Image (spheres, rainbow, N blue to C red):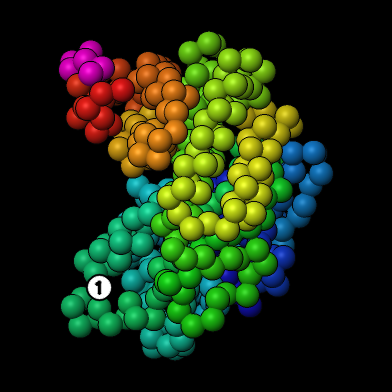
Amino acid sequence: MLAVQFGAGKIGRGFLAQLYARSGFETVFVEARPEVVESLNRHKYCWIEWTDGERETIAPVSALSASDIAAVAEAFARCAVAGTAVGLSVLPSLTPLIAAGLRRRAAVNPQPLNLLLGENALNADAMLRDALLQALNPDEHHLLNLLGLVRCIIGRQAVAELPGDPPGVRVDRYSKLPVDADAILGEPPPIVGLQPVRPFEVYMQRKLYLHNGLHALIAYLGAQRGYQTIQQALQDPEIHALFVQGAHALARAFLKKHPFDPEEHYAAVADILARIQDPHLDDPIARVAREPLRKLRPDDRLVGAYRLLIEQGEDPTPFRKAILAALAYNDPNDPEAQQLQQMIREHGAEWMLRHWCGLARI
């Protein structure tokens, strides 16, 4: 069986391709970087390093240049499953490739195909569908009936590219892939770890607020105190206490609002907390804290979690402090952090809270 993977970055190589390989698929990457394409084609494998130092080889793999539309369309027509892991801002740029792939598939293999959107975004499916409607001619819009745009929750932590030929990826061992059950066409793809869930939005929100939100809380509070990694910041007693307090408050708030099974819910929360605190990760704060403007949006990890806690009568103090720390984040190597500070200089922090974060007060 063939899997086409758009994007050979940390998640593409370090998570999705590994699940494909464990499930008996051959992976064909579609990648823009010529040196990565050449390396993968020469070696026919990629590899990951677990946080305990053990390594796993992923094979067989090959790669196609993202500029070779005809070759990508041919692979798309033949594959049994496809996936993306390119970043939400890049996702619409895949539409010429996917549109060509749909045309070719309709001609030679008109079977439904599920496209796993590994972008960790609630609007990934709508964004790609709208872009495809623009890329396809009106009389081709029916081709979208062949394509399931299946949002995914990417929980694996892929913290670093590792040098090598081909390069590796350092990851934790989390191997579950929750996906939008209502978007799957036909039977779920036979992929180890794939878990169809509904309502998808609730599970996605839990992951965003608990995992990403708590991760961001540690990162921004840690950056304020000069720490370089998440693990260093967690050694700070005050940051660790706020992390634990925020985790317990969020766990209770979710259970109040949503009909999770309590046993499953608390097991999921415990797993998230254990993986965030993995002492072997050595996760850079700059990685977790980057793009603060996106992370300060009303429904994103910090403000969304803060609002949920208030709504459910829980103490929002940990996330209030994290939001204020995020507003102060000033990494000179992060263009979005610099844009944030420029906006604060022009309008003030109170304006940012009201007009960017959607908070009347904090």
Q: Residues within 10 Å of mark 1 (few under 14, many from 20)?
A: many
Q: Indicate the secondary structure of the residue bearing disc 1.
A: loop
Q: Position of residue 47 (x, y in %)?
A: 71, 50
Left or right, 303 with respect to 56, comes to left
Residue 195 in magenta?
no
Question: How would you classify the magenta stretch by its main secondary structure?
Answer: helix
Residue indicated by mark 1: 136
Three-letter code, disc 1: Leu
At 36% from the left and 62% from the top, the residue drawn is: 125
Q: Nearer the viewer, residue 80 or 29?
A: 80
In percent of the image, x 55 and y 28: which residue is there?
245
Q: Magenta stretch?
A: 343-350
Q: Quadrant of the N terminus?
A: bottom right
Is residue 157 among the parts visible in the rendering? yes
Residue 322 location (% of width, % of height):
44, 23
Which residue corresponds to the image point at 60% horizontal and 65% vertical from the top-left? 194
Task: Give the image location of residue 28, x and y in percent.
Answer: 58, 65
Indicate left or right for 10 with 54 as reference: left
Question: Which quarter of the image is occupied by the C terminus?
Answer: top left
131 and 280: which one is in front? 280
Does 244 sit above or below residue 145? above
For the point 55% across and 60% down, the residue is 178
Q: Relative to 115, is 142 above or below?
A: below
